[in-house]
Image: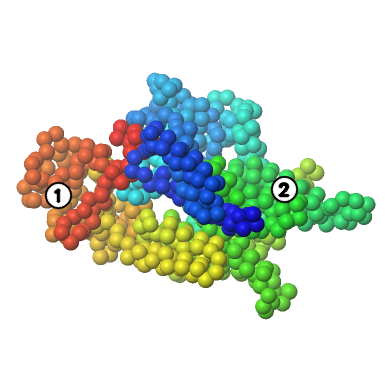
Amino acid sequence: MNRVAASRGRLFPWTPVFLATGIGVYFLLPVEPGFNAYVTLGLITVLALLLAWRFWRTLGPVFVALALVTGGVLLAGAKAGTLSAPVLSFRYHGPVEGRIVIIDRSQSDAVRLTLDQVRLDNVAPHETPARVRVSLHGQQGYFTPEPGLRVAMTAHLSAPQGPVEPGGFDFQRMAWFRQIGAVGYTRVPALALAPAHQGRAGLVVHRLRMRISNWVQSHMEGEPGAFAAAIMTGDRSGMSQQTLTALRGSNLAHLLAISGLHMGLLTGFVFAAIRALLALIPSVALRFPVKKVAAVVALAAGAFYLALSGGNVATERAFIMVATMFVALLFDRRALTLRSVALAALIVLVLHPQAFPEPGFQMSFSATTALVAVFGVMRDWTGWQAPRWTRPILAVVVSSAVAGAATAPFAAAHFNQVSYYGLVANLLSVPLMGALVMPLAVLAAVLAPLGLAGLALWAMGPAISWILGVAAHVSSMDGALGHVATPPVTVLPMIALGGLVVILWRGWGRALGLAPVALALVLWSQVTRPDLLVSSSGGLIGVMTDAGRAVNKPRGEGFAVRSWLENDGDPVPQADAFARGAFRGDKGDLRFDLGPTTVAHLTGRGASERVQAACATGAWVILSAEVEDLPEGCNIWDRKALSQTGPLAVYAEPHGWRVVETRTQSGDRLWNRGAEAQ
């Protein structure tokens, strides 16, 4: 029995790995599974669990792994199905009415509202999206956005768009799981229709969050106030894009994400403070287990912080971790173990399987797993010990280095950049977060009923200004940022698997985990970017040159251009990419060479009438108009064809050209079935 229990204990840290594998399989499927497929997977899951119970001493772990993988597919499919909501099937311009549920900022730094209870003019309720997201451009200011406020505006809306190139970021999928069925903008003032009122619990908490955020920013102006509001409430709407860019460039953006650092600092400070206060009262200290009382209070503080911050994946993971730790204290057990990390991952995956492909989940758990493993080794180390006075400094250095190394591949893959001086920036900033900023944030909450919270915020200001100054200075240093191309889809799974084998495996066999990591890095270093990219409109093209990718226009379709260049590892301004001069001809009739092939790009009025002449030269033809009668024997991608294929990627092959269509690679999934209507 002891051997069986030990075997189960060793298997448990792997359970979220197998479950995540099944979830990943679901997202990689080329077609949406049907009813028969789900029934078959369900039967396999049940049968595997029965066989695991029957043959646990021999093949039991294998059957458990199989059940978790198939269960992961079922879980992700069920989540996708339950979140089904209407998606706008046409371009809409007209009145939009709805209730504000989320306030944030777009990449253009405009205030952005997510609305529910949506009403659109002449659109039936069963065809109206559950949520729409609208950016407020132009002159606004007729009301202050507040969760629960019902607003009206005249807006341009369309369905969420898919990847701008094959294998690129799929905004359609993300929007589906958030039930956002339309996105757009307005350039005319939005108007308030009805005051915010108390509604469901989530909206009430969100309103409280925004009120606290506004109060903090009214007592601490500028970027420090916006930073303080972000770490205390999770509201980043006051942060400018310039500050966010500096934080990302210095690898300090994690200070904004309410995750393990914030949750650990807050609950740790509350735990230590309550325990110390109770210990000062002899009658209490002698009669009650003050450590366990402090653990309960700290756990309650963490739960309130989770609710106030909006409960994203990183915050949920952090709360589950600290909850596991404090519950372990209540039962006099060891708190920080890889099993607690596995439990947190398992709970998050069950609740939010759609979070698995997102960078927040991957970076959060990679950092936590590595930190727990490394500090576990340091805790059990019996060799040379550093002097006691150096241990806090050593802990900061080690934690920053380990977390940075663990998250670096995921950050580079998702954001195409590496911060070379991130460790220095963290060493200069993280101690202030722990020693001043978070304790003062707790003190502000305690003093708020007495009207003295402003004193804590005032004391917090210089520390936050220092952190922002470090971010600005480090990110502006020469060579602070490196840029990398987007890796093949197999790279991150190989790195993750190799890292988990190194951490979770026992004995010298863990060294085998280095092999997939090394192979993944080799594959990444040899990645080949498309020689030609074509947007779904046909109006934008990007051809690879010796100087980098050149685009055909200095502005317009900026999101696609920015994504292309970032995926190349070459995030220059669009105007610079246009100036690379790979094209011949005038604005509406461009020619460029693609290996031995000449490509003609036709735009503007009369583009369809110039197709015949372009084909006569033997060129491939790309145009932003539709052609009724396509000439035979000519390779033509017109607007109609591109609406069916989505953006194109063209690669040079030894025996010709390989064309990859976004729609074919994305497959027939729930979130893109309405894409052809756009």
Q: Which mark is residue 299?
A: 2
What separation in Å lies between label 2 and label 1 (alpha carbons)? 64 Å
Let me know if residue 76 appears in the view: no
Q: Which mark is residue 228?
A: none
Let me know if residue 525 appears in the view: yes
Q: Secondary structure at mark 2?
A: helix
Residue 240, given in percent of the width and then of the height, sits at 52, 50
The part of the image, by quadrant, that contains residue 604 is top left
State the quadrant of the N terminus: bottom right
Q: Residue at x 43, y 48 (%)?
A: 24
Q: Which mark is residue 620?
A: 1
Check whether the beta carbons of the residues at disc 2 and disc 1 lie within 8 A of each other: no
Viewer-nearest residue: 322 or 411 = 322
Q: Secondary structure at mark 1?
A: strand
The part of the image, by quadrant, that contains residue 471 is bottom right
Disc 1: CA contacts within 10 A as few (<14), some (14-19) or many (>=20): some
Give the number of marks: 2
| Residue type marked 1 | Trp
Position of 436 with respect to 497 (left or right) is right
Q: Residue at x 87, y 56 (%)?
A: 279
| Residue type marked 2 | Leu
Q: Which mark is in front, 2 or 1?
A: 2
Residue 103, given in percent of the width and then of the height, sits at 54, 39
Residue 308, given in percent of the width and then of the height, sits at 65, 42
Q: Residue at x 74, y 50 (%)?
A: 298
Position of 202 with respect to 529 (left or right) is right
Position of 678 with respect to 135 (left or right) is left
Extreme-bottom residue of the structure: 384
Q: Residue at x 61, y 33 (%)?
A: 203
Examine the rendered structure and indicate whether residue 667 appears above or below residue 376: above
Examine the rendered structure and indicate whether residue 393 appears above or below residue 155: below
